[in-house]
Amino acid sequence: MGAVNVAVVGATGAVGRELLGILEERSFPVKSLKLLASPRSAGTKILFNGVEVTVEAVSAAHFKGVDLAFFTAGGEASKEWVPVAVAAGCTVIDNSSAFRMDPKVPLIVPEVNMEAVKGHEGIIANPNCSTIIMCVALKPIYDNAGIRRVVVSTYQAVSGAGNAAMEELQAQAEAYVRGEAIEAQVLPVKGLPKHYPILFNVIPQVDVPVQQGYTKEEWKTIHETQKIFADSSMRITATTVRVPVMRSHCESINVETNRKLTAEECRRLFAAAPGIKLVDDLDAQIYPMPLDTSGQDLVWVGRIREDTSLENGLNLWVAGDQLRKGAALNAIQIGEYLIAD
């Protein structure tokens, strides 16, 4: 791979810092690096490959000469600065929801639809974290038996809501140990009027309400999955829940296939599939859990069993690190493909 000039927008956030760590781990061919963020984060110093790099407030001038820009600063920042970066000649891999459903923008999970990246016009969208994890698990089933319907319930770590949510869970745990009152100011959504503790709790709301009683996160899971598989006939329904786990999302997935797949056939498919680790032995109490999948690159799949209420039904339990495969790693894999191609 030839070395490229790289910019990271949102470098001080949870995903931005994870992305920088993975760029180092994978020896991504960085010729030069610009770390960009909001003015309030400007001046922060971050160590990359042994060199201290100063974070700068993002401006149009920063994109001149940049080959590849990773955006991890959220939807509003992406709407403002991604077109500016593309106009300056950058290829952008955007982690926000700003361009995901734009028909001109490829929405990519490398294990599922990497070939779709070839049609990009300067912007490539990284899917939602829970969507990425689910799609990696669905791909072997889809290719071998087709998928008619998916029912997914997510158990999402606080890392999905960023640094503030992770810090709040930590603070609530420490306050409980000290016998102090537990305060909540972030979850389920920082901008909403009510907030609930996440410690010793689960919150059945991830993101804001939108329509038909669903949240934005639930609709993302539905529509993004259909786009990634290029299959609008796949029926999907989702319930997204925040749980008191620091990082790594879990998902309970019920799949109705077009043809019958036994649990054993399914295990063989997962064992051979890229991006997946089969972890499935209920008798030995071996199954995917957040404590094991945190810091891991693969999506772990287990609790595989046939749905006894449905002729062509399967149940799966899936876990994956939201900050890695659910965000930063997925974007970097796209970048590696672009450079190699």
Image (tube, grey):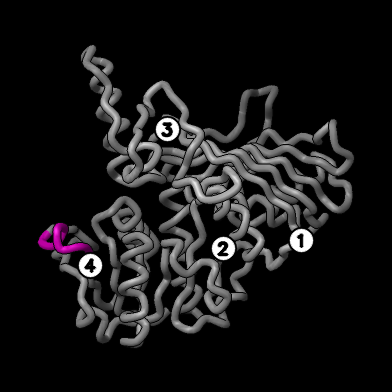
Residue placed under numbered mark 1 in the picture: 233
Real-space CA distance between mark 1 and mark 2, rounded to the nearest whole angstrom: 19 Å
Secondary structure under badge 4? strand
Say which of marks 3 and 1 sits in front: 1
* In the image, residue 40 lies in the stretch drawn in magenta: yes
Residue 119 at what x, y percent from top left?
57, 82
Residue placed under numbered mark 3 in the picture: 245
Residue at the image position 17 percent from the left and 68 percent from the top: 57
Residue type for callout 3: Val
Residue placed under numbered mark 4 in the picture: 36
Real-space CA distance between mark 2 and mark 3, rounded to the nearest whole angstrom: 24 Å
Real-space CA distance between mark 3 and mark 1, rounded to the nearest whole angstrom: 34 Å
Confirm or deny contact between disc 3 and disc 4 (CB under 8 A). Answer: no
Point out the tag, 2 or 3, that comes first from the N-terminus. Answer: 2
Could you tell me which quadrant the N terminus lies in?
bottom left
Q: Is residue 218 visible?
A: yes
Say which of marks 4 and 1 sits in front: 1
Residue type for callout 1: Ser
Real-space CA distance between mark 2 and mark 4, rounded to the nearest whole angstrom: 25 Å
In front of the other: 21 or 57: 57
Residue placed under numbered mark 2 in the picture: 109
Magenta segment: 35-43
